[in-house]
Image: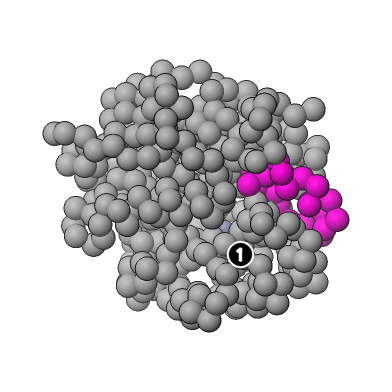
Amino acid sequence: MPTIRLPGLIDPHVHLREPGGTHKEDFESGTRAALAGGITTVLAMPNTQPPLIDSVSLVLAEDAAARHAVCDYGLYLGASGENIYTAKGLAPRCVGLKFYLDATFGPLHLKDLGTLRAHFARWPADRPIACHAEERTLAAVLMCAWLEQRRVHICHVSRRDEIELIRDAKMRGVNVTCEVCPHHLFLSTEDIPFLGAGRSEVRPRLALKNDQAALWANLDVIDCIATDHAPHLPAEKDGPNPPPGFPGLETSLALMLTAVNRGRLALEDVVRRMYDHPLRIFGLPEQPDTWIEVDPDATWTVRGADLHSRSGWTPFEGWTLRGRVERVTLRGREVYRSGAFNVEPGAGRNVAPGTQSTGEIHP
Ligand code: DOR
Ligand code: ZN
Ligand code: ZN
């Protein structure tokens, strides 16, 4: 079948676990998974160990990424009570400031409204803020954004009430963008018995069929498709305290192309949400010499054992998807072809504005 050429995709929400959780994933395994999934830029979340909240932890992550990443990347700074006055100085080296406003995996839960407002007032107006904010917390974030007259990006919207609130806020001029994950578009609470209790743990939780339908019905409100790739080992997911999260980098595009094949949306709708909008929202550099070639008709069956993520499992085990990534060209160089990589660790570049001139490790 003839292949189609698309821009290298941008995933604005990825957990790569380095430093501190490299038994689950590291910059190399996670960015290999990205390339295999047609994603050439990943924006990595700060809920690492240590959490990425100051210049010491930022240097640790920058150094690890510079040495190991095989696709392009950016790093988020985590908002905490400790970095209200120092975050701004690190903004040029980050792709955004991330707020964890509801309980989830990792140490970065920010609970008080005063800290939230203080960060919203100080973080540079032209740099992105991304929020994990569910239900009523979402309303609080939108209010803060409105009061500061600044833009805000809402991560992994999963419920009807949330997408409808964002729709209303957009209509009234609140400067808000949002992302939805493939797992909330394709799975619901009805899948929990088949996945098992531990394996289906994710934050936000899998929602009702009614919520899932609302996401599809409000596609026009959804700016980005983001994986929230959150790798944990099968033994952890099946253990007594299952951590929340699904790997998603290698199934995201194929799930969306399968939906295109079923007539649920157009190919352009996918490209806008997986390339154009993330590029614009996060102010990333255009990369005309980075592209992917995809066979939109090829079918393949998802097997956790075949994936490149260290987590080694997938909630879509056994699903037959349509659309396979055949080739990936990263800044003029073919780095992936028919399942084989031709790229060395460290080939990925930092896309944050204050790091691009050198692409080197920061002192
Ligand atoms: O399910 C999730 N897993 N949701 C999050 O917000 C964090 C993530 C993780 O880091 O594992
Ligand atoms: Zn989250
Ligand atoms: Zn996340």
The quadrant in which the C terminus is found is top right
Q: Quadrant of residue 358?
A: top right
The quadrant in which the N terminus is found is top left
Measured from the top left, where is residue 184 in percent x and y?
40, 61
- Classify mark 1: helix, strand or loop: strand
Tell which of 163 and 185 is nearer to you. 163
Q: What segment is highlighted magenta in the picture?
A: 75-95
Determine if the C-beta at disc 1 is less than 8 A from ligand 2. no
Q: In percent of the image, x 84 and y 51: which residue is there?
A: 86
The answer to whether any part of residue 16 appears in the image is no
- Compared across the picture, whether 70 is left or right of 87 comes to left
Task: Give the answer, above or below, for where 2 lies relative to 163.
Answer: above
Q: In percent of the image, x 61 and y 64: which residue is there?
A: 152
Q: Amino acid at mark 1?
A: Val
Measured from the top left, where is residue 30 in percent x and y?
50, 35
Task: Inspect the magenta stretch and tell me whether residue 171 lies in it.
Answer: no
Task: Give the answer, above or below, for where 209 lies relative to 74.
Answer: below
- Compared across the picture, whether 268 is left or right of 1 comes to right
Measured from the top left, where is residue 104 in percent x and y?
61, 59
Tell which of 22 and 359 is nearer to you. 359
Q: Quadrant of residue 349?
A: top right
Read off the residue under disc 1.
Answer: 152
